[in-house]
Amino acid sequence: MSKQGVEPDELSRPFWQAANANKLVIQNCQQCDRLQHPPLRKCTACGATEHLEWKPMSGRGQIYNYAVVHDGPIKSLHEDQPFNVAVITLEEDSGIQMYSHLPGTPVDEVPIHGNVEVIFQATDNGQKVPEWRVVD
Ligand SMILES: [Zn+2]
């Protein structure tokens, strides 16, 4: 399905640059060893602003939950309806959630708690975005 281009900002740029290199990185606070997503200027747990790093992830996760969009608000996606919007939790931290259309998985055939792995798909402006596909 077609995808809207993403415009990285200063804070999220490392995330998007990694995506263009087919890598998933998540912001990590070195002071309290805690991941957070989306990235913020400071750690929401300890308030650190100077010990935030970008940590490579395994790219494996699980489907936490999902919905099927039949009549969404984004016009450019209307021709692709209905489509999945799944909530993915990362292997490293089930508190980190990402969203996926689960390319290749038909609507209403989404295995809840199924395993997924990250893939990267180019959007309209060439920026790659993480997506997830179901694995056995
Ligand atoms: Zn912290």
Image: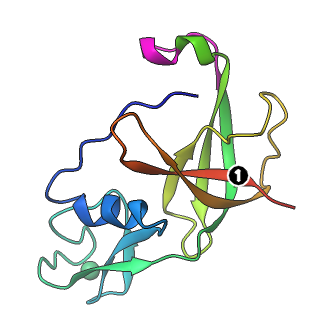
Q: Residue at x 33, y 58 (%)?
A: 16
Q: Quadrant of ligand 1?
A: bottom left
- Local packing at callout 1 (Cα closer than 10 Å; few below 14, some 14-19, many 20+) is some
Residue 61 is situated, as x and y percent measured from the top left of the image, at: 65, 64
Which amino acid does the dot numbered 1 rest on?
A: Arg
Q: What colouring does the structure picture have?
A: rainbow
Please identify the quarter of the rendering in which residue 105 is found. Answer: top right
Residue 2 is situated, as x and y percent measured from the top left of the image, at: 51, 27
- Residue 102 inside the magenta-drawn segment: no
Q: Which residue is mark 1?
A: 133
Q: Residue at x 80, y 59 (%)?
A: 135
Q: Residue at x 23, y 72 (%)?
A: 43
Comparing 3 with 86, the one in front is 3
Please identify the quarter of the rendering in which residue 29 is found. Answer: bottom left
Please identify the quarter of the rendering in which residue 42 is found. Answer: bottom left
Above or below residue 126? Residue 78 is above
Above or below residue 135? Residue 57 is below
Above or below residue 16? Residue 81 is above
Q: Residue at x 60, y 57 (%)?
A: 119
Q: Quadrant of the C terminus?
A: bottom right
Q: In the displayed structure, does residue 118 sit left or right of residue 129?
A: right
Comparing 104 with 111, the one in front is 104
- Residue 72 inside the magenta-drawn segment: yes
Residue 62 is situated, as x and y percent measured from the top left of the image, at: 69, 59
Q: Read off the magenta span.
A: 68-77
Comparing 12 with 124, the one in front is 124
